[in-house]
Amino acid sequence: MAGQKPTTARAVAVKVLNSFDPIRYNAREILNKVMGQTSQKQQATDLVFGTIRNRSAIDMVIGKLADCPAERIPAELLNIIRVAAYELIYSPKTAQYAIVNEAVEIAKAAGVKKQTGFVNAVLRQITRHIKNRESLLSKADAEKTLPQRPSRGCEFDISFLPKLEISPAEYLSSVFSLPKWLVNDWLSQFGAEAARQICFASNRRPCIYIRANRLKITAQKLAQKLSQVDIDVEIVGDGSMIKVKSPKTITNLPGFADGLFSIQDLTASKAVELLNPEPDWTILDLCAAPGSKTTQLAELTGDKAKIIATDIDNRRLEKVKENIARLAINSVSIAAYDQLQKTAAGSGPFDCVLLDVPCSNTGVLSRRPEVRYRIKSKAITELAKVQSRLLDSAAAMIKPQGRICYSTCSIQNCENSELVRQFLQKSPQFELQCELLTLPSAEEPGCDGGYAAIIAAK
């Protein structure tokens, strides 16, 4: 914003959104560059990602109630209005007057004083048409209500949404700012109620989980350590993961720099647990960056297995090195992807290949909200071809009776069970030992979606 250092969360959020292109950038990278300009870091984060998750629904409200399509509003004004509209609709505890007043002030500070009246008029019009900022969905009119969470929503006094019973895909796409073709896929794969829950989960504020580095500390002792400095935590799952409830910057928590824990979602941790690696194995992590599963392999094997980590992206492979060093892990060696390919199988054949493939990210849309504006059905088809080639490569690298741990953070069948079964049909020397599909959940404790399969050579 011209001539003024942003100090409030709302001003920072507008600045990030003005620089954000969902097709080209991840919002987190932009936010990290300006986060230091505000002390309200948690609120700024919520405003940025909340606005992106719900952008299409917000623009629909603006177009309907302001009688002006969002695309016709100047960019420098539109993001000010979007952030304020997000708070009005999705943050019912925040006072309306504070939201509207600061939006007007941000417009003034941005040097568009002549348009502050327009910003004020649009937001006042939205507030006039809000009937209840926190209605029970079970009692609210679905055609007038934008859901906030599974039980509550913001109810307006006019109908502007598609009829759920007539066009469920169009309705869910509209209220959750998701591609209609993707919602249709979920409806056909999982049914109406499960698809609805996936939509809620895709728009939730994601939970933060950490995995205790069992080479240094137990989850119980780590939870005690964090509780002693007033960090609200809860041990979840099988007792190895911790949910962090306090709104803190995780990398600043006590123990992070000392390698006592890693950041990892509950679902992401399940693939390696399903594999149950042994200390005497030689393991290749073929798509290792940023190293969460690589280091989990080392921790579960007591840092005694021989683990080779590689990734086609050399820049991201540096992140694996950083995590290995921070966690003080000795059993992982880093290999350049090109060099590994030249030597056919590196130090193989391997007892196991961990294959956490690049995917569509449809299981982590709450955590990566910009993906909903990039993802195309055709692109997923192309991704599945890449995944299939990687699975073939992994199969050529394992020992007799070796295993492949195949995983994605997608919930699309064509990237998961369908792809694995196609591989098994053309590779009868392999068999499926087990598989696990986890759908994203908005219920407590909440988790991302993903898929894991253990494929064994006969």
Image (cartoon, rainbow, N blue to C red):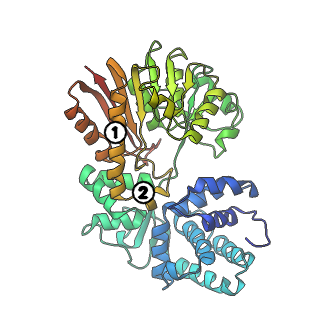
Task: Check disc 1 and give the amino acid type.
Answer: Arg
Residue 389: numbered disc: 1
**Upstream in sequence: badge 2 or badge 1:** 2
Residue 259: numbered disc: none
Q: Residue at x 35, y 23 (%)?
A: 403
Mark 1 secondary-structure assignment: helix
Q: Residue at x 55, y 81 (%)?
A: 73
Most distant residue in the top direction:
280
> Comparing marks 2 and 1, which lies closer to the viewer?
1
Residue 344 screen position, x and y as percent:
41, 26
Task: State whether residue 100 is above or below residue 214.
Answer: below
Quadrant (top left/top right/bottom left/bottom right) for the N terminus? bottom right
Binning the other alpha carbons within 10 Å of mark 1 as few (below 14), some (14 to 19) or many (20 upward) gives: few
Mark 2 secondary-structure assignment: loop
Give the left or right position of residue 76, taking residue 242 as reference: right
Q: Residue at x 49, y 60 (%)?
A: 53
Residue 151: numbered disc: 2
Residue 271 screen position, x and y as percent:
41, 31
Give 389 or 251, whichever is nearer the viewer.
389
Give the left or right position of residue 243, taking residue 437 as reference: right
Give the left or right position of residue 361, taking residue 196 as reference: right
Q: Can residue 237 be seen in this snapshot?
A: yes
Quarter residue 182 falls in: bottom left
